[in-house]
Amino acid sequence: MRPASIARKTHKWLALLIGIQALIWAISGLYMVVVPIEIIHGDHFVHLHGSQPPLALDKVRHDINDVRQSYNDVRSVRLKPLLDEPHYVVEHAGGLTLVNAVTGRERPPLTNEEAERLARALYTGKSAVQSVTLLAEVPAEIRGRAAPVWQVRFAGWNDHTIYLSPITGDLVARRHNLWRTFDFVWMFHIMDYAERTDVNNPLVRVATIAASIVMLSGVWLLFYSFRRRRAAAAR
């Protein structure tokens, strides 16, 4: 097979593959442009501020210094409202502990009913709670977060889902179907087909090499075509 024929076929088939990926880039990019990023983030269905009543400092009876002395290697202590009472969130060598600022006693993890109550307070919509589940392992859509975590799902086409820390009651993440679609098309957009957590995706390098081959073979065919025309004109 002549070099020109090899270059032509290589150029054609690689350009087809790259063209398919370019179409995927265009479609996925269109989705990411059309749907506002604020909606993707889920800002529209969660009260980011004001979901809890104001911190009642007059209810605080337990001194913060007593809290610090009760744990080894305390890294931080913050005061937050939780279910109508102030609590200390203590980060120490053993992890996180929630201490009731009124009684001074450690608070047990959130119950099913408490997690639902907190999620309802955060939720701006009117849909009913579909399920409340304590997950021992985090799902892929909130990968990177720590387990266990409360998952509260609301009814409706968009499947609004709120994740809460069972220790502190803090909002861990919020997800919905528009976010999940975004996450899916983003995978195609960055060609992350094999491993979602692989930052140095080898497919991107392959695509770069393929595009370089298409470009070089196209340049070679361009000069080859000019050379053939000059040879034909000289006859």
Image (cartoon, rainbow, N blue to C red):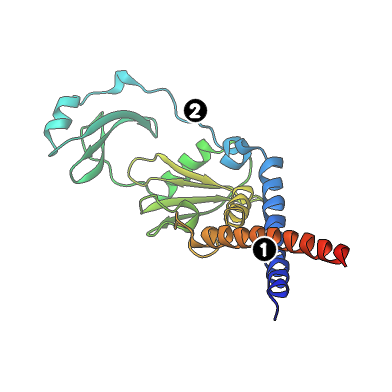
Q: Nearer the viewer, mark 1 or mark 2?
A: 1
The local secondary structure at tag 2 comes to loop
Q: Would residue 92 appear left or right of 160 to someone viewing this image?
A: left
Which quadrant holds the C terminus? bottom right
Q: Would residue 91 appear left or right of 215 to someone viewing this image?
A: left
Residue visible at 14% across and 38% down in the picture: 73
Q: Position of residue 54 (x, y in %)?
A: 42, 22
Q: Quadrant of residue 11?
A: bottom right
Looking at this rendering, what residue extends furthest in the top direction? 58
Instruction: Please give the residue where the numbered disc 2 appears in the rendered image.
Output: 49
Mark 2: amino acid: His
The local secondary structure at tag 1 comes to helix
Please give the label number shown on residue 217. Answer: 1
Q: Nearer the viewer, residue 47 or 201?
A: 201
Q: Would residue 137 appear left or right of 128 to someone viewing this image?
A: left
Q: Nearer the viewer, residue 121 or 228?
A: 228
Q: Is residue 167 above or below residue 148?
A: above
Q: Residues within 10 Å of mark 2 (few under 14, many from 20)?
A: few
Mark 1: amino acid: Ser
Residue visible at 19% across and 46% down in the picture: 94
Alpha carbons under labels 1 and 2: distance apart? 57 Å
Which quadrant holds the N terminus? bottom right
Q: Is residue 158 above or below residue 195?
A: above
Please tell me which of labels 1 and 2 falls first in the chain.
2
Q: Would residue 13 appear left or right of 55 to someone viewing this image?
A: right
